[in-house]
Amino acid sequence: MVAWLVIPVAAAAGQAPERPRRTTTVGVAAAPMSLDGVLDEADWRTAPQIGELVQRQPVPGQAPSERTDIRLLRDAGNLYIGVTAYDSEPGRVVGNQMARDGGLGTDDRIEILLDTFRDQRNAFYFATNPGGTLLDGLAFGNSLNSDWDTIWDVRTRRTDEGWVAEFAIQFKSLNVRAEGGTWGFNVSRTIQRKLEENRWSGARLENTFFQVSEAGEILDIGRASQGLGIDLRPFLAGTHLHLGRSGPSELDTRPGFDLFYNLTSSLKLSMTANTDFGETEVDARTINLTRFSVLFPEKRSFFLEDAGVFSFASTGPQPAAGIPGTGAEVFPFFSRQIGLLSGQEVPLDAGVKLTGRVGRTDIGVLDVRTRDVTLAGGREVEAKNLVVARVRQSFLQQSYAGVIVTDGNPALPLSGRTLGADLRLATSRLLGRSRNLVATAYALRSINEGRTGRDWSYGMSAAYPNDRIAAQVVVREIQENFRPPIGFVQRDNVRLVRAAFSFNPRPRSFLNLQQTFHDFYYTQFTNLSNGRIESADFYMTLFDWHFRSGDNWHGMLDFQRVYEHLFEPFAISPGVVLPVGEYRFNRFRSNLFTTAARRRVSGGATVTWGEYWSGDAEQLTANVTFRLPPTFALTLSANQTWAELPEGHFTARIFTSTANYTASPRFAISNLLQYDNRSRNLGWQGRLRWTLRPGDDIFLVVNQGWVREPGEAPRFRAMDRKLLAKVQYAFRF
């Protein structure tokens, strides 16, 4: 089986002919640059253009419907990118956002990839829209981590001919070779009202923009000055905690700092002391009605820095949009296990991280010291060191072999470690054609004090992720004692098999359709203790229509056939316990509507109905967004399940509201209000972020909770209230 997965990929990667890459050069600024969104300096007028973009969609390979001029300049400390996005209808340019890290999927936008070591696997990502939003991230594994932030700037300006974007990206914000050399480079322009995407390189439907191997090249970036390579970011945080409605108040002031030092041009040492994450956004509410754990994303900046180095081949491939995940993902290292236990914060005294590369070898080492803490209920957790080490050797263009080691147990006073190895073979030139194929294999063992035997997880996958036809096969085993202490496992004591096929044609002149999707996914879990099938699921999407207007009909009628075998009782809701036995049921889902998100008023609604375990259940999810672009957006959403089972009836309900005001790309106020009837808790987070200049920020955050008291009247009792003020500055040497 391994040979069947590996040999075709390796052969394709080795035999596919090289095609000419697009290349460009960068001009040198002779005078200081003024970042104002007006490309009127003499250096801009003489800088060479990179060449015309090429249409990726709706008509691949054609000339864009609107012209885009792009020029590159540099000085001793910065790379400048000037973009003039011409538009024949400038009044219809879409720019709904201004907030830092705001999602740009609804807007016209310019996106940039910088592969500073030309390794064709990792890149820095920068993007903006006509409103001047700053969006950055790390591209790796053909995906994007947009939670990463660094210091850079952009200015935009609307004109009578379209709009202009002027980027200034400091070399100190990137891992670069001091001597310069060749960089991977790509740029994309999206014209939202036309659903048109134009790229400089790799403008094929099979390629995502984050497929770094498809980027072109800046032939000689020149010497990149990073000074001493030291970034010092001290902060002062003050917290006021008020317990309950009339309880005591606690005031705490905490100074700390983050320090970044470039040991070499490609190796960065990151240090944090007395770390505070109080400004981090809260998690979205969820009510878990499944038998596996819910995975929440990491949002803390220290752990997001160079997070791609620690990624491992035991996750993915990702399913098509709208298709449920396997529910059996395996993470040998999951950073949320550090500093968070049972939903309560565990303070971090200090952390050290070394990340980067030596030649074609990626290196990641993390050591974090947690503090003694007493959790709710009186449980004491002692201070300890938690260590992760990751090495990954690249070969060919997109492939690697790696190992990972973790040491320490954040939750128990017992020793624990994880050892593992993984392999990824990938090509975007399958048999000489522009087709993607990715094969992975991994093996992991957890070694925990008090647990012996049956402590392995291993598996393999093959994915054919292309535009018109996509397919995947996943085989994974997770043994009953496999418990990575600094990792995450959704489900254990099972063997997973998933097979999937998708057919996604693009009709040329039928109902103004852009693309239609037809997905077929079969997933099966076998219980390792008795060899019997524990779960089986067949999911079919027949009609998923995306229109050129941006409106979608995401599945007019999806069908799901489910088999569940409970070997022990399952409490699906408080007071509702499903007995041991076999359950077979059919579910249907229909998307009532999904309007184009670029509209001033947009939204969607989906209803699911049919048999459910031993009875029946209906589910309704709906959302509506009202915008006054680009300053204000209000979103209301609801997710409700009504279940009628012989064992009992229950309702699972979540309401969410966001109200965001953005005065400028550097000053934003966000509000998140959430309620769920399982906890009966109403929570509000208000968050203000004011960026004085790139790297210097002021945060004001308030978290307030209320609990709904029993009774017919909707009365809420105030719970804890937490106020945070944080000031952080950046000093670059």
Image (cartoon, rainbow, N blue to C red):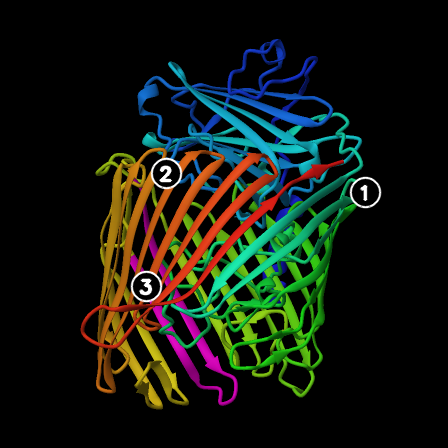
Foreground disc of the pair 3, 2? 3
Q: Residues within 10 Å of mark 3 (few under 14, many from 20)?
A: many
Q: Earlier in the sequence, mark 2 or mark 1?
A: 2
Q: Is residue 558 magenta?
A: no
Q: Which mark is residue 388?
A: none
Question: Mark 1 to mark 3: distance in Å?
Answer: 49 Å
Quadrant in which the N terminus is drawn: bottom right
Q: Earlier in the sequence, mark 3 or mark 2?
A: 2
**Looking at the picture, how far across and down is residue 464, in whole percent?**
50, 53
- Magenta-highlighted residues: 514-541
Above or below 265: residue 477: below
**Looking at the picture, how far across and down is residue 78, in whole percent?**
67, 27
Dominant SS of magenta comes to strand
Q: Earlier in the sequence, mark 1 or mark 3?
A: 1
Residue underneath mark 2: 106
Residue underneath mark 3: 675
